[in-house]
Amino acid sequence: MDLLVVGSGLFGLTVAERAASAGRKVVIIDRRDHLGGNAYSVTEPATGIEVHRYGAHLFHTSNPMVWDYVNRFTGFTDYVHRVFTNHEGIVYPLPINLGTINQFFRAAYTPAQARALVRELAEEFDPKAASNLEERAIGLVGRPLYEAFVRDYTAKQWQTDPRDLPSEIISRLPVRYTYDSRYFNDKWEGLPVDGYAAWLERMVENSNIEVRLGVDFFDESQPLSRKATVGQLPIVYTGPVDRYFDYSAGDLAWRTLDFEQEVLDVADFQGTSVMNYADAEVPYTRIHEFKHFHPERAEIYPRDRTVIMREYSRFASRDDEPYYPVNSPADRASLLAYRELMDGERDVYFGGRLGTYQYLDMHMAIGSALTLWTNRLASH
Ligand code: FAD
Ligand code: NA
């Protein structure tokens, strides 16, 4: 074995695939019973509908190197992501655009009129001087749009009143003064034609790669533990950085999500893939309906049934799946301490979302793994 990769998410898979293609013998371990990390999907058995097991995953990138790389393993559909939100029983398009504004104010403003209105409403606060998230948001879009579309949704995401949240959580609140409601601005966007699982499994087809599932790096009863391997060979570690150092510089805070999946005997539950729920009365933040991610599978998918998933957000404990970094000032201080510890750990390369305590979209995880391979591991 020339390289041990801890974690089979897109970061670990990309490094492993590159190393194997260059002739290295690679072992990937993952403590889960499947590879692919959070991008993994399964076929819901009663309906045959592909379900993104850890929440909806939309692939998008403007990076030609990443786009070229992922296309070696899968084709992508021409799916274009759009999101809607239910506020007081009325459905609006997101992100806030001219359609949202005109529907909300029951108006027919031109782009210039809408821009002038928002500017006037936003005069209440200077976003640069805001002392909390609420003031920042009002300073950017004005109170009416904030109260309808931002306040309760943010409170549900963080289980915290936005007046008690730091203003830095939002740097911008995009408002589009056109009717363009496309969610992503990237050059390429789509979903893997045969699903995420097929894509991720194709990345480990090289016979130089061995995948061992259900193996925890910190379980000293197994032969590829931290204790048995660190210092023996190069290791790419994509698990939580605080766990690696036994939480010696403190626990890094994460938010996690709870998912509630349901198979319904209706042809179409909500007419679209993602519906947000903007109001406090509804406890979940959004509902995913998976058949809408693949309109091209209409012939294969059942006509009379559908799969939906309600998403709830909360702070993670050590036993929960860590999803989004909280990134409070205390977390940033801990992270600096962990970075020093990482620098002192020879031949261990920390990467990915958990290993760097950073939210990374798939294309970012892949891009940074390609860079790690090229700049540091290829010549190792
Ligand atoms: P992960 O996928 O988390 O993989 C890390 C792996 O390490 C896991 O499989 C874990 O089991 C394993 N591991 C951890 N500790 C150990 C241990 N001790 N021993 C062995 N194995 C261990 N990106 C997009 O581009 N578009 C989206 O729409 C999108 N939606 C997302 C929604 C959610 C809810 C989340 C959480 C992420 C989303 N992402 C999205 C991001 C995407 O999932 C990540 O970019 C990608 O998963 C990053 O891969 P990674 O390898 O860094 O981490
Ligand atoms: Na302002």
Image (tube, grey):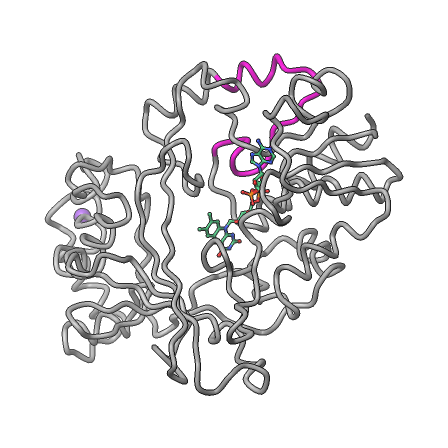
Q: Residue at x 41, y 85 (%)?
A: 267
Pick out the residue farthest to the front: 221
Give the tally of numbered discs.
0
Up/down of 156 relative to 265, above or below: above
Residue at 53% in and 80% down:
295
Q: Nearer the viewer, residue 288 or 375?
A: 288
**Who is closer to the viewer here, 9 or 124?**
9
* Residue drawn at point x = 41 percent, y = 72 percent: 263
Picture residue at 36% right of the left edge, 37% below the top: 316
Q: Position of residue 218 (x, y in %)?
A: 59, 25
Specify the quadrant that holds the C terminus: top right
Residue 92 position within the rendered picture, expressed as x and y whole percent measured from the top left:
26, 72
Q: Is residue 206 above or below residue 181?
A: above
- In this view, the residue in front, 315 or 172, is 315
Q: Quarter containing ligand 1?
A: top right
Q: Please say whether residue 344 is one of the residues in the magenta stretch.
A: yes
Q: Which residues are magenta?
A: 338-357
Image quarter for residue 346? top right
| Residue 348, magenta (yes or no) | yes
Identify the image quadrant of the N terminus.
Answer: top right
Kindly give the residue lying farthest to the right in the view shown.
23
| Looking at the image, residue 337 lies above or below residue 146 | above
**Rendered location of residue 274, percent (x, y):** 38, 67
Q: Position of residue 284 (x, y in %)?
A: 27, 58
Residue 134 left/right relative to 328: left
Is 334 on the left-hand or right-hand side of 378? left
Residue at the left extreme, as displayed: 124
In this image, 3 relative to 93: left or right? right
